[in-house]
């Protein structure tokens, strides 16, 4: 019996000791937030009509229809640009039979094709990059038609602007 009383006393004393340790604990909260990045671009006016050109002739926007790529995202972006082959013409470094040249310019564009860069079917940097959210990059376009062509219908010579996270 005495052994039982001693055991109960020891158990009671040890539970008091351990319960005081649990009461001494505290907590704190770390406030954490997150925003998903949004990479987005729009182009205004987004339409260029060069009209009807003769063979080996050139036309450009040269300030009359300057395009504006705008960062619609929520982070800094780099813009890239690419041209395309049309249904019947090939985009090339120089005009030839059923091959045309398409170029872009981001600064000092009044004297085309001076300061213009030839487009390819691969992406190239459009401007210096690091365009802030809501920021913009303007650019002009300049086209030279084929030196000769077997196709005399309107060709779609679209330009694509790509936005990537800076």
Image (tube, helix red, strand yellow):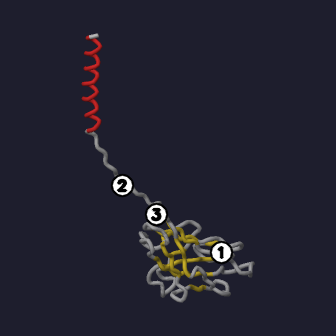
Q: Nearer the viewer, residue 41 or 9?
A: 9
Q: Is residue 4 left or right of residue 165?
A: left
* Crowding near the residue tagged with mark 2, few <14, some 14–19, many ≥20 C-alpha atoms within 10 Å: few
Q: Nearer the viewer, residue 155 or 67?
A: 67
Residue 97 location, quadrant:
bottom right
Mark 2 element type: loop
Q: Residue furthest bottom?
A: 64
Q: Which residue is mark 2?
A: 31
Q: Is residue 146 left or right of residue 39?
A: right
- What is the C-alpha distance between the residues marked 3 and 1? 33 Å
Q: Nearer the viewer, mark 1 or mark 2?
A: 2
Q: Position of residue 8 (x, y in %)?
A: 29, 19
Mark 3 element type: strand
- Point out the tag, 2 or 3, that comes first from the N-terminus: 2
Q: Which residue is mark 1?
A: 99
**Residue 165, labelled with which disc?**
3
* Crowding near the residue tagged with mark 3, few <14, some 14–19, many ≥20 C-alpha atoms within 10 Å: some
Q: Is residue 108 left or right of residue 151?
A: left
Q: Nearer the viewer, mark 3 or mark 1?
A: 3
- What is the C-alpha distance between the residues marked 1 and 2? 60 Å
- Residue drawn 66% across and 87% down? 51
């Amino acid at each position: 019996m005495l052994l039982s009383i001693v055991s109960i006393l020891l158990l009671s004393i040890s539970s008091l000791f351990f319960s005081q340790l649990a009461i001494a604990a505290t907590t704190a909260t770390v406030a954490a937030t997150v925003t998903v990045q949004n990479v987005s671009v729009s182009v205004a006016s987004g339409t260029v009509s060069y009209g009807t050109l003769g063979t080996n002739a050139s036309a450009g926007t040269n300030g009359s229809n300057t395009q504006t790529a705008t960062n619609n995202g929520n982070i800094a972006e780099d813009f890239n640009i690419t041209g395309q082959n049309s249904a019947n013409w090939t985009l090339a470094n120089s005009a030839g039979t059923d091959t045309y040249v398409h170029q872009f310019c981001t600064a000092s564009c009044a004297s085309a094709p001076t300061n213009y860069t030839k487009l390819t079917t691969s992406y190239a940097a459009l401007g210096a990059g690091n365009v802030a959210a809501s920021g913009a990059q303007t650019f002009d376009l300049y086209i030279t038609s084929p030196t000769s062509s077997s196709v005399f219908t309107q060709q779609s010579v679209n330009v694509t602007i790509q936005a990537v996270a800076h």
